[in-house]
């Protein structure tokens, strides 16, 4: 249940508090009980009310408030209504600070406002501050802290209508998505969508937020038709939504489904609309993610020079905002472009610092048992590596028969689908991004390199999440392992390549990214077959076929109900 004000007239304690407040205000103004009561009430009634022995009606309280020269809200709660207005203005400023400045600075503002709202008993403002705090730490990659803030906001608003709770629900779903828990992320979003549509709470803003957030986990789970339908419904809702930030985020989500369908020109046009809105609103984090996604689109089209330029802009913008998790995800995308441009040493030097415990060169790849076992350089299939899988997966010679997995950056901060060994990684930008313009003054030029620099010199705050793990950016972590495996294969180091492929597979199996798993199994099978390990290769191919058996299917239940009239 949500909190109930101490001055709630429905409780005995609330009635007693209101009685004491009436007595104080009457005494301060020099009124007798009769003067305060007349003409509608009696002195005896006021006396009983002041002693807390009666629960006054709303009509009585409004009469007394008018006589005492205060607002109804101030009489019933003890709060000056200007306090709520002032706090709401402060929350708007804090949200603007998060969009245009430093997440840590914005978090400090939200923290102060939350404490003040708690002191004043302003529940709604306190919940809004908690969601803001969740968004701040989500940007810096502190997923556990973000989830705790969103959950606290949901608890405060437990007895409020669902649309009021949607921002917290969406935030929690994004946390689970970035943690590699794709099915649970879908579950949270679909439950909220179903409840909104089934109960007649047709709130376009809330629905647009939920449908847009659902696109990313759908894509990574291989539920491409469901993702495309979410994009269609979001587009249909857009004319009813007056928040340009939500519209821009929707365009980014729609772009991802267009990329998956190979409609890159339309995807770029959708991203251009989002970028224009973000520039007008000066929402820097989301703007950086537009650069990230456009880099992915250019890489898909083979324009690697433009892809590198866009990705470097995105990377430097995110690093300047200390958006640690998103920054290292962009670096995986950038490393793929560098590898495709023949700069494998730079790509490898960029990738290795992103993984907490990458396989060392020359580490044994494991025995002849099966594709289920672990190479010395990577975890067992059921385990997890220090870093996570790429969004994409495909064969070393090109995409699978079904084409690349629905690739591209997600609307909420992760990558989408696969790509060829010579194509871009599956991943794409997350939902949020930094300032407009070119690379930061301290960052590399478009033609330069971040090789050997890692994240530490790229502007990540001390103590931030500076690496990819199974719990932080698992899909991109797998992507990093996949790319390192390809690089190792290209230099003839099959043992290290196998270790990286197995590490990526373990991470992808944890997340349930089915299409990418099938492609990685093919990569591993080809590697084992070329090394003469035919039985192990067959095991890898069979494992991949299990994931590819029903393209586009998932373990999700029925699709959520659709809004009426859409």
Image: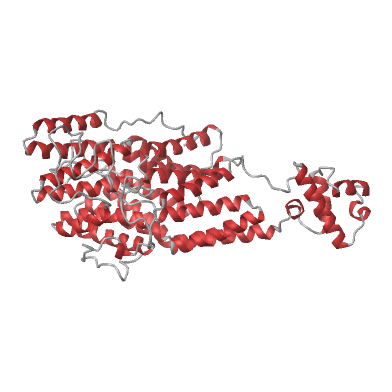
Q: Splitting the image into 4 quarters, where does residue 84 fall?
A: bottom right
Residue 208 appears in view = no
Quadrant location of the N terminus in the rendered image: top right
Left or right, 230 with respect to 305, comes to right
Q: Position of residue 292 (x, y in %)?
A: 31, 55
Q: Residue at x 11, y 30 (%)?
A: 535
Residue at figure coordinates x 48%, y 52% from the top left: 134
List x then y, in percent, for residue 294: 29, 55
Q: How is the image coloured?
A: secondary structure
Q: Looking at the picture, does residue 534 appear above or below residue 131? A: above
- Residue 28, by quadrant, is bottom right
| Relative image position of residue 255 (x, y in whole percent) | 33, 48
| Residue 295 image-quadrant placement | bottom left
Measured along the vertical axis of the image, is residue 213 above or below residue 81? Answer: above
Comparing 4 with 553, the one in front is 4
Residue 126 lies left or right of residue 191; in this view the side is: right
| Residue 325 visible in image | yes
Q: How many marks?
A: 0
The answer to which of 54 and 66 lies nearer the viewer is: 54
């Amino acid at each position: 249940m949500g909190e109930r004000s101490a001055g709630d007239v429905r409780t005995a304690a609330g009635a007693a508090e209101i009685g004491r407040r009436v007595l104080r205000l009457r005494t301060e103004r020099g009124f007798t009980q009769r003067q305060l009561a007349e003409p509608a009430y009696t002195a005896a009634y006021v006396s009983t009310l002041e002693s807390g022995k009666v629960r006054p009606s709303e009509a009585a309280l409004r009469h007394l408030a008018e006589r005492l020269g205060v607002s109804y809200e101030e009489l019933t709660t003890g709060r000056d209504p200007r306090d709520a207005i002032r706090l709401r203005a402060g929350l708007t400023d804090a949200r603007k600070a998060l969009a245009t400045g430093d997440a840590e600075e914005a978090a400090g503002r939200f923290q102060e406002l939350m404490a003040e709202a708690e002191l004043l008993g302003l529940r709604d403002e306190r919940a809004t501050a908690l969601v803001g705090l969740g968004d701040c730490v989500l940007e810096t990659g502190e997923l556990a802290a973000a989830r705790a803030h969103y959950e606290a906001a949901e608890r405060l608003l437990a007895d409020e209508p669902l649309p009021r709770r949607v921002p917290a629900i969406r935030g929690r779903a994004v946390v689970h998505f970035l943690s590699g828990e794709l099915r649970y992320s879908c579950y949270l979003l679909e439950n909220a969508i179903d409840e909104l549509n089934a109960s007649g709470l047709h709130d376009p803003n809330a629905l647009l937020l939920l449908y847009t957030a659902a696109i990313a986990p759908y894509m990574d789970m291989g539920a491409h038709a469901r993702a495309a339908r979410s994009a269609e419904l979001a587009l249909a809702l857009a004319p009813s939504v007056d928040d340009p930030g939500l519209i821009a985020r929707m365009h980014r989500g729609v772009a991802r489904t267009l990329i998956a369908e190979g409609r890159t020109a339309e995807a770029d046009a959708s991203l251009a609309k989002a970028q224009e809105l973000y520039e007008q609103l000066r929402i820097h984090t989301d703007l950086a993610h537009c650069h990230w996604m456009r880099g992915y689109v250019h890489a898909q089209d083979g324009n690697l020079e433009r892809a590198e330029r866009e990705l470097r802009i995105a990377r430097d913008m995110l690093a300047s905002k200390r958006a640690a998790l998103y920054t290292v995800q962009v670096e995986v995308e950038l490393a793929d472009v560098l590898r495709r441009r023949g700069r494998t040493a730079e790509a490898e030097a960029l990738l290795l610092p992103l993984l907490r415990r990458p396989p060392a060169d020359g580490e044994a790849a494991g025995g002849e048992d099966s594709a289920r076992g672990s190479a010395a350089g990577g975890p067992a299939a059921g385990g997890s590596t220090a870093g996570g899988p790429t969004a994409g997966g495909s064969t070393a010679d090109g995409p699978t028969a079904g084409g690349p997995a629905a690739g591209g950056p997600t609307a909420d901060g992760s990558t989408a689908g696969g790509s060829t060994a010579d194509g871009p990684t599956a991943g794409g930008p997350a939902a949020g991004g930094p300032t407009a313009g070119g690379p930061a003054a301290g960052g590399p030029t478009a033609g330069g390199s971040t090789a050997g620099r890692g994240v530490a010199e790229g502007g990540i705050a001390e103590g931030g999440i500076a690496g990819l793990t199974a719990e932080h950016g698992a899909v991109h972590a797998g992507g990093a392992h996949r790319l390192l495996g390809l690089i190792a294969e290209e230099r003839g180091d099959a043992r290290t390549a196998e270790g990286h492929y197995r590490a990526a597979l373990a991470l992808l199996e944890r997340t349930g990214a089915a299409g990418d798993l099938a492609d990685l199994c093919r990569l591993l099978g080809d590697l084992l077959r070329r090394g003469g390990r035919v039985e192990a290769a067959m095991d890898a191919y069979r494992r991949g076929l299990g994931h590819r058996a029903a393209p586009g299917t998932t373990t999700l239940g029925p699709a959520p109900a659709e809004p009426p009239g859409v």
